[in-house]
Image (spheres, rainbow, N blue to C red):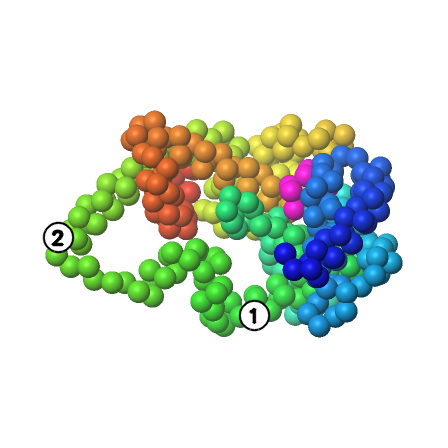
Amino acid sequence: MSPENDQIEQLLNECSGQMRGIYDSCVENAPNFGVTFDTFSSSLRQSVLKFLYREGWDLPLKADVRDFLDSILADDLFLALACAAGNERAWWEFDHQHRAYLERISRHLASTDLTAQEVVDMVYVELYGTRVVEGERVSKFGTYSGKGSIRGWLRTVIWHALVDMHRASHDEVSLDGMTEAVGEGYTHSTFADTDLGGEDRMMEKLAHQRYKKATLEAIRSAFSGLGDHEKLLLLFYHAEDLKLREIARLAESPDSPLREWFQRRSAARKKDPTAKIHESTIMRWLDKTYKLVLENFCVELNRSHGFKDEEIDICIELATKDLADPDLYRNLASNA
C-alpha cells in the first residue's frame, strides 16, 4: 500500500467513531431494517473514496472527511442498503415513502400512461435486482451513495429506464447489454459457433444430450416441488406475460388464490390485511420462488444423477436457456 493510501486509510479509521454514531442513529430510526454496521460503514467508506479522493486532488484533512460524512443523507442510505438486501420492512417503507413520487415522475417523463406503467415495472425489477454475480443478487440500490436525496437518484434511474426502453424498441442492443442479460459464456458462443468436427464434435453432442435430458428431468422435478401458489405466480408472470402490477392487482382481489398466501407471508400485511400490494412485493416473492426452484433443481441433479458441482453448473447453463421459453411455464397450469 502506498504512503498516500496509508494516510487515507488512517483518516477513515479516525472517523470510524463518527460512522458508528451515524449508524446508531439510523438503527434508532429504523430498528427492523437489518443493516449491519460493517455493511453501512463499507458503503460510507466507498462514498468517501469516490467523492473525496479523485485522481489529482490534494489529500484532504480529517475535517474534510468529517464534513463529508455529515453531508450524507444517512437515513436514505440506510433504507437503500436494507432494500438491496431484500428486507421486507424496508421495502414496505420504500413503497410508502417513494412509490407515489416514482409514479408521478414516470408519468411526467414518459410519453404515455402505458409507457409510464412499464417504466415503473422496469424500475422495480432493477431496484430489487434479478442479475446474480458471484452468488450475490445485484440491486440497483447498490449504486446509491447517500450523497444527494434518494428521490433525486430515483429520477436518474427512471430516466435511464426510459432510455433503455427506447433503445430496446429500436432493436439497439449492445454486446455489453446482451452479456449482462444472458451471461458472458452464452453471448460469446452466439457470435463464435466453432465447428469442432469429427470425433470431438460427436462426443460433445452426446455429452450435451445427456446433460440436457438430466436438465429437463430436474426442471420438472423442481417445479413439482413448488406449492400451488408459487406455481401460479410463475404461470402469471412467464406464461401469461402479466406485468408485476397486474399480478399485484390480482393478489388484492378477495377471491384470488394468491391473496391469502401473501397475507400469511407478509408481516406488514398481517397488521393491515387491506394494505395495497406493490410491484416490489411480487418481485420479492418471485425471487424467493426462483431460489426454491434452483435449490430443488440442484438437489435433484445430485440425488438422481450423481452430478458434481461442475456438471450441475453445465445443467444450470442449459436450464437458463430453456427457462426463457414460456412453454416451460405453461406446463405448470395443470398443477397450479
Q: Which residue is mark 1?
A: 166
Q: Count all numbered tags in the image, as a single digit.
A: 2
Q: Measured from the top left, where is residue 282 in percent x and y?
A: 60, 42
- Disc assigned to residue 193: none
Q: Measured from the top left, where is residue 161 in percent x and y?
A: 61, 63
Q: Pointer 1 and pointer 2: residues touching (CB < 8 Å)? A: no
Q: Which residue is mark 2?
A: 199
Residue 320 located left or right of residue 304: right
Identify which residue is drawn at 42% across, 37% down. Answer: 332
Task: Identify residue type, mark 1.
Answer: His
Of tags 1 and 2, which is closer to the observer?
2
Task: Identify residue type, mark 2.
Answer: Glu
Check disc 2: other Cα within 10 Å, few if <14, some if 14-19, many if 20+.
Answer: few
Q: Which residues are magenta?
A: 84-90
Residue 85 highlighted magenta (yes or no): yes
Residue 64 located left or right of residue 8: right
